[in-house]
Amino acid sequence: MTGRSQFIMTPSGQETALGLSEFDKLKREVPVSGDAAKTAILQKVGRRIAEVSGMEEAQWEFVLFESPQANAFCLPGGKVEIYTGILPITRDEAGLATVIGHEVAHALARHGGERMSMAMGLQMLGSVGTVATAQSKYGPVFQQMYAPASQVAVALPHSRVQESSADEIGLILMAKAGYAPQSAVGFWQRFSEYNRTSGNQTPWFLRTHPLDEQRIAKIQSLLPKAQAEFRPATR
């Protein structure tokens, strides 16, 4: 959907197995919400997003966890977890579709496998560098600086690229599922306000996600593309 190239070394089956394992662990550690009405809305929105994802092999499961965190995840294999703390920000089905579309996009684009592949590549490069500089006066400096430098210069920028990619794919998924894509702008504006009031002062170069204002501007620029995929829901 985005035309972006990827480097992935991990088999999809391995990613799915890890996702299922982590999801089982999460269900043991975090209580599942007992709110039937909110869970029903999650199931409805999740099902509509899943139907247009093209991930026919996924074992979809949408679970609402009782947690104050304003967060959500989609693990490989189709396991989607939404924390109740994000519901005041989503507000309605379209807001929830924005979140679920974004998270499902991560799984659809195999961002988890891409991150694992990058981590393995950086680890191998670090090992090569350690051996190469072992007898050099620069060896201790390399060993001390490689990990933080690779994070700031490679891993974190890569994470921000993935997040932007998931925003774009998620916007198209919610449009195909019958949710007006312009609703995503309202959600991200509310989420930006949440971040502001919660005091997130992390410098931009240390963030895993794009700056809120950049994110919103990018989504606004993608609205015509997403609107072309919009099909009003019939149910």
Image (spheres, rainbow, N blue to C red):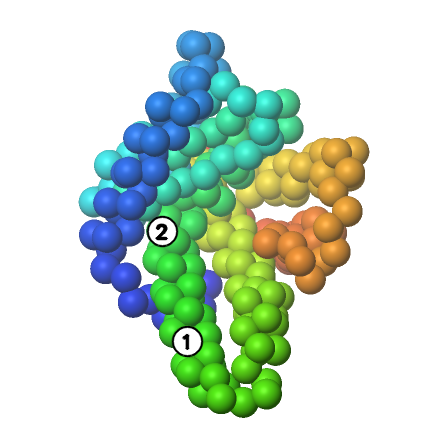
| Residue drawn at the location 52% of the way across and 31% of the way down | 96
The amino acid pointed to by label 2 is Leu
Image position, residue 154 (x, y; %)? 55, 69
Q: Is residue 3 visible?
A: no
Q: Quadrant of the N terminus?
A: bottom left
SS type, badge 1:
helix
Q: Earlier in the sequence, mark 2 or mark 1?
A: 2
Instruction: Specify whether 55 is left or right of 38.
Output: left
Q: Could you say which is closer to the camera, residue 89 or residue 141? A: 141
Q: Which residue is mark 1?
A: 127
Seen from the viewer's position, the closer of residues 45 and 106 is 106
Distance from the alpha carbon under mark 2 to that under mark 1: 32 Å
Q: Disc 1 marks which amino acid? A: Ser
- In the displayed structure, does residue 29 sit left or right of residue 24? right
Which quadrant holds residue 25?
A: top left
Rate crowding at label 1 as few (under 14), some (14 to 19) or many (20 or more) other CA atoms within 10 Å: few
- At x 39% / y 53%, what residue is drawn? 112
| Residue 56 drawn at (x, y percent) | 22, 44
Q: Secondary structure at mark 2?
A: helix
Q: Which residue is mark 2?
A: 108
**Looking at the image, residue 116 lies above or below residue 21:** below
Q: Nearer the viewer, mark 2 or mark 1?
A: 1
Q: Nearer the viewer, residue 198 or 123?
A: 123
Location of the C terminus by quadrant is top left
